[in-house]
Amino acid sequence: MKSKNVKWIVMAALFLSCLCVPSWAKDPGLTDTTIKIGIFGPLTGAVSLWGWNMSHGAITIYNEASKGGGIHGRKVEVINMDDRCTPEGAKSAVKKLIFSDEVFLINGGLCSAGPLAARDEIIESKVPMVLTGATMDRIMEPVNRYVFSPVLPASVDGVMMVEFLMSKPGTKRLAMVVHPDEWGKSKTEKGLALLKEKYGLDLVASETMDRGATDATAQILRIKEAKPDGLLLAVYPAEAAIFCRDAYKYDLKVPFVATNAVLDLLDLRDRVGSLKPVENVYSVSYLYDSLSKFDDLAKIHATYFPKDKLSSFILQGMGSARVIVEGLKRAGKNLTREKFVDALETLKDFDTKILSSRITYTKNDHKGTKVGRMVTLVNGQEYYMDAKWQEGLK
């Protein structure tokens, strides 16, 4: 064969190969028309309602982003996995999402032990993960290129609890009720250090309350004996309801300040079965305002999940998903995982219009927010405020 003909054959082959493949190598979970996103959280077990709510909130945002032309021509496909709120369940869910479902990125983690256990797999696989609700600082430490959080860290939660109580005039004696586990420690450790270092105070009483506890009488009687001016409540909603019920029964009348796990105070009221026992409860919040201020999102959500009642967990899922959608938009049409991460690392003052503060990431800091708000009930309605005591509020 003449060399001239060989040259034309080679050129034709190269031309055809260019027509058959894109100009950049696509990462798993990505086509010209779709982006596959994996979600994991508790879909079975004691806190499954939270998991379904959070994933439904995220899915609503992805569905809205997929309307019309989608995100640079791509619609979002979601794979929703159950982690059972356990470390083992999370590791299994994440492995399936990465290696079997081949998702482009992961948006997940409500129970902190789950994403903490799955963190190494995420990092090794270089699959970006944006948390939905897990707050333990250890998930984010040390900073890693592929792990991001848009939620209030547990340490900030605890510091806000202490600062809020100490801003009440005349407060000198604080007590605490906490779950005796790593979650409870993460929520209170830095706050208690601040209490000692800044105010020179120790707790006058510290009680533990196990998960699943059905009575808090003994703890309450010991706390009453210590005569505190306020109380830190670092437990989950079910146990917070038990504590508030029994505290009301035994006339423990001081301000209770709870972690952001208990921010849905209307839910707390319903769990207790009465408004009176929760009227003196305040909670740190990762939302910027009450549920009633999100009627527009409630209507949109109802088009996809008509049986859902708007909740803080739905909104948290929405806020996290909005961060991801913004990152995908900024990464551009020639999307890769690395470009998505680059886009997030330059995100500054992004307003989700849901979460308690604007989101900012840098290469050295992937904790997107460090400012929360406080919520309480006034005349049976949620009332939001900055993290400083307001005299005459009730």
Image: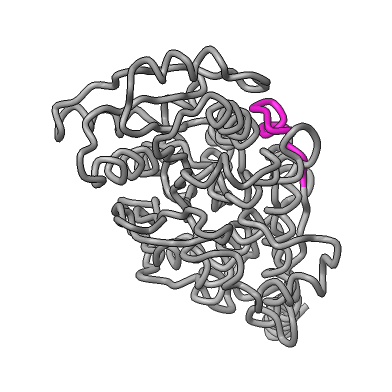
- The picture places residue 359, in percent across and down from the top left corner, at 41, 64
Residue situated in front as seen by the camera: 76 or 203? 203
User: In this figure, which colouring scheme has been used for the structure?
Assistant: one colour
**Residue at 43 percent of width and 49 percent of height:** 152
Q: x%, y% of residue 64? A: 71, 77
Q: Quadrant of residue 11?
A: bottom right
User: What is the quadrant of the C terminus in the image?
Assistant: bottom left
Q: Quadrant of the N terminus?
A: bottom right
Is 130 a magenta residue? no
Read off the magenta span: 81-92
Looking at the picture, tell me which residue is in the foreground, 308 or 170. Answer: 170
Coordinates of residue 230 in the picture (x, y in percent): 35, 34
In this view, 150 is above or below 178: below
Please give the name of the residue rendered at 59% of the width and 51% of the height, measured from the top-left corner: 264
Q: Is residue 324 above or below residue 40?
A: below
**Count of picture labels:** 0
Q: Is residue 91 left or right of residue 170?
A: right
Residue 133 in view in this figure: yes
**Nearer the observer, 86 or 49:** 49
Q: Quadrant of residue 98?
A: top right
In the rendered image, residue 37, in percent from the top left (x then y), is placed at 69, 58
Magenta residue check for 90? yes
Task: Report if residue 3 is visible in the image.
Answer: no
Closer to the camera in the image, 256 or 213: 256
Compared to residue 303, the image places residue 122 above or below, namely: above
For image coordinates 62% across by 64% down, the residue present is 318
Residue located 31% across and 46% down the image: 164
